[in-house]
Structure formats: C-alpha cells, structure tokens
Image (tube, coloured by chain):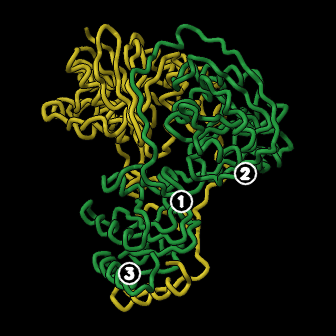
Chain colours: A yellow, B green
Amino acid sequence: MAYKCVVLVKQVPDTANITGQAMKEDGTVNRAALPAIFNPDDLNALEMALSVKDEYGGQVTVLTMGPLRASEVLRESLYRGADRVILLSDRKFAGSDTLATSYALKCAVEKIGNYDLVFCGRQAIDGDTAQVGPQVAEKLNLPQITYAETIQSLENKVIIVERVFPRGREVVRCTLPCLLTVVGTANRPRPPKADRLFSFKLAAIPQEYSKLLEKWPEFETKEALDQYLDERGLKITVWDGSDIQIDYNRVGLNASPTKVTKVESIILQSEESKDFDANREGMEALVQELVAEYTI
Amino acid sequence: MSKTKEVWVFIEQEQGHVATVSLELLTKAQELAEKLGSRVCGLLMGSEIENLPDLVIHHGADKVFVIDHPELAIYRTLPYARVAIQLVKEHEPYIFLLGATPIGRDLAPRIASACKAGLTADCTALEIGDLERRDQSYTDLLYQIRPAFGGNIMATIVNPEMHPQMATVREGVMMLGKPDPSRHGERVSFEPQFEDSDFVLEVLERSIQPPTIDLKSASIIVSGGAGIGSKENFKLLYELAEALGGEVAGSRAAVDAGYIPEEQQVGQTGVTVRPRLYIAVGISGAVQHRAGMDQSNKIIAINKDPNAPIFEIADYKIVGDLNTVVPELIRIVKEGAELGEIHA
C-alpha cells in the first residue's frame, strides 16, 4: 500500500564551517557571511521518505518554514525526488522559538492533511535543540519515534523502526500515523538527479519572478511567467499564516516563551601561558616543566 | 503561574539504576532552590522502584513524586509524557530540569509543547537572576546559559512569563554533590490516568551498554580535532595517551569526521571534563568545545594556526605541525617513564 509522507526541512547557516571572516570584531556572528545549507539531518529524513515511496509507493511532500530564500532547499528537494514542496513564510513568524515554530508547522501539516508519516531530521545544526520534531508530534497528537535509523518493516500501517543512541539501540513497533526524527547515520542521501535538476531548476516562488524575468525577458509579464510555471508544475506553493488559519497570537517573538537576553563571545584567558618551540628541544622543555609541577 | 517556586528534576532510571545526570541535577536544583527559598522535587517514574526515592532524597530532593506502574517499566514517550504533563499542570513548578540524554531529549519537548513552556537545550550553566525588559521587571528568573550558533557564542536565555522554566543539561556538566543519608524528604504517590492511545507504540527490543570510557574521571586527556586530518593520524593520540596513562577524546569536528566515536566527544554537546592535564591537538577551540574543557587544571594546545582560539585558554602553547610535535612528545615521555622520571 502507498504511504503519504511529509518531510519537515530547514535551511540553516553552515555553522560547521565558521571561519574568522564570519565573526565580527565584537565577537558576534556575521550571519550574512555564512553560506546557507540544507540542514544535514533533514537530508537523511528526506532520503528515508523517498525510500518509503520507492518501496511502497505514495507521495513525498516537503515543507519548510523560513524566509523566502529558503526556497533553495525546496528546489534541492525537487532535484532529489520530492513530489510536492511548500514554503511556509510570513514576516510575523520572525523570532519564533521552537514552541511557536512547532505550532506554525503543525497548522501547515494539518492543511496538507491525510498523512501517514511525518519525517524530520534529528536536529538542526544552528540550534542543536532537537525540539521541533517532538513538539510538532505533540501538537498533532501523534506518537513520535526519535533517533530513528532504520525502518525494518512497514506493513498495513504498522511500522517497525530501529532507534540508535550513543550507547545502545531500541526496536519499536508503532501504528501509523506517526512522526520520526531521523539520525545522520540512517542512510546516504541520494544526490540530485540530472534529469530532475534539468526539469526543476526553473521552479520558483512568485516572489522570485522579477529576478527570473531579468533572465528570461521573453516572458514579458509576471502573469505569463506564472502561467508557464504553473502549467509545468514549477510554481512553488507559498503559504503565509492566513493560508493555514494560524492564530497570530501564538507565533513570533511575543509568543515565544524563551528570550535571549544576552549574547557574548567568551574571551577566556589563562592567567599566564608559556610558548614552546615545535621541535625536540621545545618538547623536552615542556615535559620537564610538567614533571616539575607534578602534572605528569 | 507558579506560586511555590518549586524546582523539579526528572529522575531518569533504567532497570533500577538512576542516571548520574539526574543526581547532578539534584545538586544544582538544591543550589537554585536555596536562592529561591523553595524546595527541590524529584519526579520518579518506573515499575518496582520502591527502593529509589531514598537515593533521590539523599541527593537533595525535599519531595519525590513516585509513579510506580507496570506500564512505566520501560521508557516510552507517551505514557511518561502523560504522567509528567498531568503533574506539571496540577502543581505548576517554577523550574523543571531534565538530563539531555536520549530519553530527556525525547520527553522534554513533548512536555514543553503541551504545557506551553519555554525549553532550553544543553545548558552549560544555570543561575538565578533578575531581568528588566520592556519596562517590566522580573525577579528570580532562571538564567539558562548555553553556547549557541554552532558553539561560537554564549547566549543567556530566560523565560520571563511562561512557566515552568524548562532546561536540559548534559551529563557531567554540573558537579555531583555527595549524598547525605541523614536527609529526610516527603514521598508522594501518584496514580496516573492513562488513555488507550498512550500505548500505540511498543518496545520490541532495547539494549543499552554501560559507558566504556569514563572521560569524566580521567586525570589526563589527549584530545584531537579536525586538524588531525585522518583516523589513521588519531593513532598517534592513542599512543601519547597510553604513554601518559590518559584517555583519548575529540572535538565535535573529529566526531563528525568519523575519527572517534560520539561518546568520546568533549564539549557542549558531549562530555564536560576537568582533568589535571588536557592536551588539545589540532583543535581550533570553538566555544562549543571550550565549554567542555576550560576547567582543566593545565591545558596544552598544539596547533599550526597561531591565531586558533584554543591558545587563548592554553597554559602551554606549541605552534607547529602535530606530526612532528606529537611523535617527539611520545618519545620523550616514554624515555622519561623508563628512567623513572615520569610516573604515568
């Protein structure tokens, strides 16, 4: 039987590759200097959903919440095999913490509706909280399977999943619908397919039309471009809060219980430090010092 | 809104063994409750756990909710969340702390979502403090301090209005206090109200191994980062650690690169260590990593980049290629050990 899958993905700053240029002089992070990437664990979540579709049939819908430029991860999802992609974007979402974010995502998943499986990455590299998946599950009243690594079987709407932890494993059986958060060791995400890359590189959200018209002046008007893209399934759906009947009192900075009050770069300084040369003499002097002070 | 300002700790147990992180949190909770003039309360769930409440009280709880039920024998999200949510809604704790373990990270967001509470993951420090914000003043809030943005900055997070103020903390971050067998506390039994839908998930198999390496109690740690370059090169660090009688650890970058297993990761998202000697090799020293090792007694940093932040906290600095420096160190330490000059 076929399964309807929804994958929640996030565009994140590439925090793993922060270099000197990305730090401002006051020690804060210059976000603009960081490349935005597909959150790594979310690629594993997408791969798991795509392999469910490969094996059992069904449909994979990818949903992301973020600014308009997050359309990039949706195009990437199309290249890899997603059937449908949706961008959830609204200025009033700005400043949402995990509680407010999970509420907005819940409303969007409900609008998608009729799902069997919701997949998320275990955590996003910009916050490392691992909270949004379980919070969406709670709000949708779904059971959750966190740390999911392998789907061992899927039959008649009953799933058996192996979970992995730093020091152990667990196998659970659950009746669908349910939500899984997928670990990075789950699989090797398939690369973008050449034919799909060719087909979907034009996929765009309406807010990107002016930029596209500069490249393809032959369309002349946004309406003409819109019609062209829509007919070919290349128009990426954008939802704002009103499209998903959101209660605006529950999103954004004011609706987020956690507030960041202080951000600082920590200047840690040891009281006094000694330099040693990177050669035999230097290492001998270092070892002598360590022995003299009873460190070794 | 909480009236009693109670500080709650989720007591994680597996087959009758209480997780160390829960006991560490009881120590911290005692300190917080003292500042608030309130009480520490443990939330203990499981099956046949009648001998555990004393341990929880000895480690700092004034009160323990004991939920002893056959359906709670093995952790499952929905039954555990059901109980915790019922108790939080009924008693409105002011602060609720959980270990940032696979179980704590599964359970805490579920509770926070249902109770509309703020939750901060992987805190490295917890303090009580005041806040002025938008012409409002708040007293006695929980400052939840954690490295943010990939560990490059330190952020203080507060939940001024929506309580409980929830936070998770990794094992080994907070100090474990000594138990006091003369302490007395109150035991409160609670009969949970489950629904059939709580049992939609079934655990077929579960195996958890005890930790193989105890980084927290190692007195010498040799640690490598992305700069090591390969799993092969990490063998040098094992050799140096063996010569010194120490353990090997790594930064998050080393774990991500597959050089060492996750349980050997030092830092905010790994283990916090306080050894006598910490040797950081090829580690640049993001806050994420430093948060887990800056309380080491002596720090040696070996890095080819003279501007690496790790040098800011190093007692001994060596700017150079680890492939020259580490073999020299190994040779000198081994010679010293043979001559009896080094008692590794």
Residue on which disc 2 sits: B127
Q: Is residue B335 above or below residue B177?
A: below
Residue at figure coordinates x 45%, y 35% from the top left: A66
Quadrant where the N terminus of chain A sits is top left
Nearer the observer: mark 1 or 2; the answer is 1
Residue at figure coordinates x 55%, y 53% from the top left: B147
Q: Is residue A261 above or below residue A170?
A: below
Q: Position of residue B93 (x, y in %)?
A: 76, 31
The amino acid type found where label 2 is placed reads Glu
Residue on which disc 3 sits: B333
Q: Seen from this angle, which residue lies furthest bottom?
A: A281
Ranked by sequence position, the earlier of labels 3 and 2 is 2
Label 3: state its secondary structure.
Answer: helix
Q: Marks 1 and 3, how far apart in space? A: 22 Å
Q: Position of residue A69 (x, y in %)?
A: 39, 39
Asked if one can make out residue A294 in the rendered structure from this viewpoint, the answer is yes
Q: Marks 3 and 2, how far apart in space? A: 42 Å
Label 2: state its secondary structure.
Answer: strand
Q: Is residue A19 left or right of residue B321?
A: right
Q: Could you say which quadrant of the image residue A49 lies in?
A: top left
Find residue A165 and name its label: none
Q: Is residue B225 above or below residue B211?
A: below
Q: Label 1 lies in what chain?
A: B
Which sits in the foreground, A83 or A172? A172
Q: Are marks 3 and 2 on the same chain?
A: yes
Q: Label 2 lies in what chain?
A: B
Mark 1 in CB contact with mark 2 (< 8 angstroms):
no
Asked if one can make out residue A223 in the rendered structure from this viewpoint, the answer is no
Residue on which disc 1 sits: B217
Q: Position of residue A185 (x, y in %)?
A: 31, 39
